[in-house]
Image (cartoon, rainbow, N blue to C red):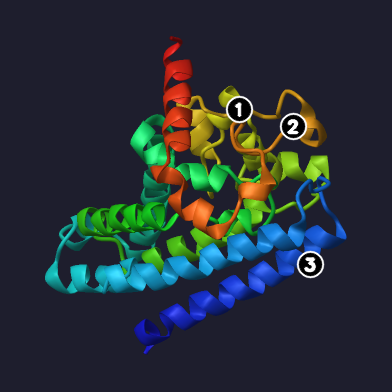
Amino acid sequence: MFNMNEPVFRALFSLTLFAALAVAETVSPRRSLTVRKRRRWTMNLLLTGVNPLILRILFPLVPFSFAVICSQKQWGLFNVISIPVVSEVIISVVILDLILYLQHVAFHRFPLLWRFHLVHHADMDIDVTTGLRFHPIEAALSMIIKLLAVAVIGPPALAVLIFEILLNGASMFNHSNLNIPLWADRMLRLFIVTPDMHRVHHSVIIKEMDSNFGFNIPWWDRFFGTYKAQPVRGHDGMKIGVGQFQDQAIATIPWILKLPFTAHAGRNAAILDRQRKGT
């Protein structure tokens, strides 16, 4: 019964959190938006609606149901060793979050993967809808990585459910334009990725874009040396997006979907690759 209701539960949670954050960031915004909200929201939400449909066609199994199968077949590490269930759940969630961090770094480091992740960064403002804006091919690649991780780790289905809920909720929260007092942000970012922490990652400045890769657990950036506390120009002065894509007039759904396959995306990937290599 729980397995059958899992998609409904996740959908209700996501819609409720989205509505709460949308209201909160409207009432108390962190930054003034530079692009018309209706235009951005229409594009971002249309893209958000397309991805689940494509993933449902491509993947008959989602990570949760695959975890159930792995448990029945005794596939994966935690299905062949015996430790307390609570420990299995906690460790599995932490490992899955680490894999997500490494995946995010890879999508920045490898030019081919960056072409698809570029769609997420090409948003010229950042708010709750940005956390849902991903190219369908990036969403498909992410699904493959998660399914492989489930097969290797063998996490309890409950751990996968918790991880997926945290991932979806954290992505909306840390992309939101919510104004959190600085003292509260300093405390919160010890335990979760806050909007101020992740916003640095959406800067047009390459060194800032290559920082703060975490989505949920903030410790990976500190451990791997990719943490940057604040943007050099401050949150009010920083520029959001990608330097070569700042024309809102061309930002349409067809443009977004074909962007990874254009020469413009290739040049952007090549420029980033050269700058990282110092050539």
Is residue 247 toward the left or the right of residue 215 in the image?
right
Task: Give residue 66's position: percent from left, percent from top.
Answer: 26, 69
Camera-side residue of 50 and 89 = 50
Residue 217 seen in the current view: no
Question: In whole angstroms, how far apart are the C-alphas of marks 2 and 1?
Answer: 10 Å
In this figure, which residue is indicated by the disc labeled 3?
23
Q: Quadrant of the C terminus?
A: top left
View extreme (right): residue: 27
Point out the frontmost of discs 3 and 2: 2
Question: Tag on residue 182?
Answer: none
Residue 205 seen in the current view: yes
State the image quarter where residue 189 is shown. Answer: top right
Q: Secondary structure at mark 1?
A: helix
Q: Residue at x 75, y 58 (%)?
A: 37
State the image quarter where residue 20 is shown. Answer: bottom right
Alpha-carbon neighbours of circle 1 within 10 Å: few (<14), some, or many (≥20)? Answer: many
State the image quarter where residue 6 is shown. Answer: bottom left
Q: Residue at x 15, y 59 (%)?
A: 80
Amino acid carrying mark 2 in the image: Met
> Pointer 2 and pointer 1: residues touching (CB < 8 Å)?
yes
In this figure, which residue is indicated by the disc labeled 2?
238
Alpha-carbon neighbours of circle 2 within 10 Å: few (<14), some, or many (≥20)? Answer: some
In this figure, which residue is indicated by the disc labeled 1?
208
